[in-house]
Amino acid sequence: MILKLKFIFIIIDLTDHATWLALALAFAFLPGIAVPACWAQAQAASDSTQPAAAPNADDPPDPPPSADPEVMLPHFKDSRFWLSGQMNFIAQAHPDFHADYSGPHSLSPRYEKATSRVMTLYTGVRLNNSTELLVDIEEAGGAALTQGFGLAGNTNLDIVRNPSLSKAPYLGRGMIHKVFALSKDKIENQRSYLSLFDDLPRRRLEIRLGKFSMADFLDLNSVGSDTHFQFSNWSVDNNGAWDYAADTRGYTVGAVADYEDRNWGFRFAEALMPKVANGIDLVWRPWQVHAENFEYELRHGVVPKKAGVVRLLAYSNHANMGIYRDAVAQFQEGLVQVPDITHQPWHITHKYGFGVNLEQNLTRYFTAFARWGWDNGRTESFVYTEIDSTFNQGVGVNGALWHRKQDRAGIAFVSNGIKKDHQLYLADGGSGFLLGDGKLNYGRENILESYYTAHVWRGIYIAPGVQHINNPGYNRDRGPVVVPTLRLHVEF
């Protein structure tokens, strides 16, 4: 372990671009070859391969290894209670890269490194056979590359984008979960910090009220939604064009209704929006400021006789958001020195968008996923990131293929873009809550990410990876950027 960490720090201190890329790529993929070869014989007696996906296309994909990770400490055997926790540390760096110019919200072209941390204590109690209370306490801190500025598809989803926030622990989630049975037959439920029930009615209505993250329940897939075990880029783990209601830390207050039937489900979420873009304070006037989210899920593969899921997403936000075209007009009329999307009186505007999320079993060990997203683009990017259109695709691999069922690996490509009004705003020198190079030579931001997550011992996991970014912040005059990553994750 010490030798591995020393090797990482040597990589982080390098500044030569070519050396960085070669070593990072080697480090990202060698564990997938060397580790299985060295440990396969020792693990063969205790590891068994994951069963193949059922040939019935109506069945969902096999649960990923992350659905039941090995933990350091045993959990409560009494199913009425839940107590668990996790620690996630992500270290990233990048060498010097080419930049013709930089602005107030540019990714720094000089070498830098940063480490983030998120630590969570999950608790829960089942009050009766249909009601439970879930409460999570969280602490997030560390640093982000250039404080999180300069990339639409930021390289680390765990970062806190407001460094002035208190480092004290806070309430992450706090919700009541109620299940209404609509059929007598039951299905087995994978217990987790989001649901303590051992089984659930096959047809049911679930209601959740309280504080939560929209991404806990919508736009999920088994191989591209988890920074603890999988990818870490914002626009790979989530639909980048989904400007979902949240405060700076990613949480909101509201309600989620989830209807589940045998082969399909439908979810609706109503939630509060923040006062300002990327703000920590929510507006407690839901009759004015609010967000609606809809998702239809069909558990049916797109490949014949292979399990899969198709999810269709739509959202609508109402908040004090600026209009890019109005901000550019103010600048052209000489009312402001640079375009300012916040230079407006308080008024409610509308932002909406759509998304598609596909998940498809290819073989027993390989699962593919893809996302497409679009929003109206004229209204200010307000909550998640500055992306108006996105497409990503990737593949996750189960380590059971090489007799290490707790390991996993993946590779994904994502292409992000913004609409014409948004482009003109940035080209004239405007800044959003994430982007602002002072000028813009527009090009789509294209990102390639790979990772390998290795189970070291009990609940300890180490994951080297690398991201390659072309046109950071949609700017052809800057980049490309290579960002090696090392994640340390502990489950207990």
Image (cartoon, helix red, strand yellow):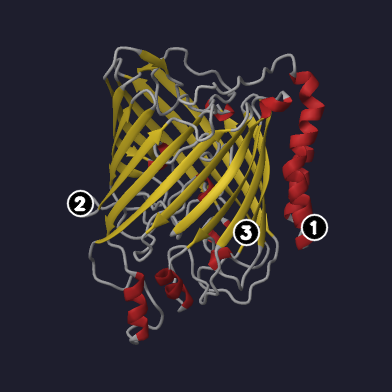
- Above or below, 126 against 491 in this view is above
Q: Residue at x 38, y 44 (%)?
A: 313
- Above or below, 139 against 346 in this view is above
Look at the image and tell me in which quarter the N terminus lies: top right
Residue 465 location (% of width, % of height)? 67, 45
Observer able to see residue 121: yes
Which corner quadrant of the image does residue 294 belong to? top left
Marker disc for residue 78: none
Residue 63 location (% of width, % of height)? 53, 26
Q: Residue at x 49, y 66 (%)?
A: 435
> Which tag is nearer the camera, tag 1 or tag 3?
3
Three-letter residue code for mark 3: Ile
Considering the numbered disc 1 on the image, is that residue within a helix, a strand or a loop? helix
Mark 1 nearby-residue class (10 Å; few <14, some 14–19, many ≥20): few
Q: Which residue is mark 3?
A: 469
Of residue 297 and residue 98, the one placed in the foreground of this image is: 297
Residue 141 location (% of width, % of height)? 51, 48
Q: Which residue is mark 2?
A: 285
Marker disc for residue 19: 1
Q: CA distance from mark 2 to mark 3?
A: 40 Å
> Which tag is nearer the camera, tag 2 or tag 3?
3
Three-letter residue code for mark 1: Thr
Q: Are marks 2 and 3 in contact (CB under 8 Å)?
A: no
Three-letter residue code for mark 2: Arg
Of residue 308 and residue 284, the one placed in the foreground of this image is: 308
Q: Residue at x 56, y 21 (%)?
A: 73
Considering the numbered disc 2 on the image, is that residue within a helix, a strand or a loop? loop
Between disc 2 and disc 1, whose residue precedes? 1
Residue 30 location (% of width, % of height)? 77, 40
Considering the numbered disc 3 on the image, is that residue within a helix, a strand or a loop? strand
Between disc 1 and disc 3, whose residue precedes? 1
Q: CA distance from mark 1 to mark 3?
A: 17 Å
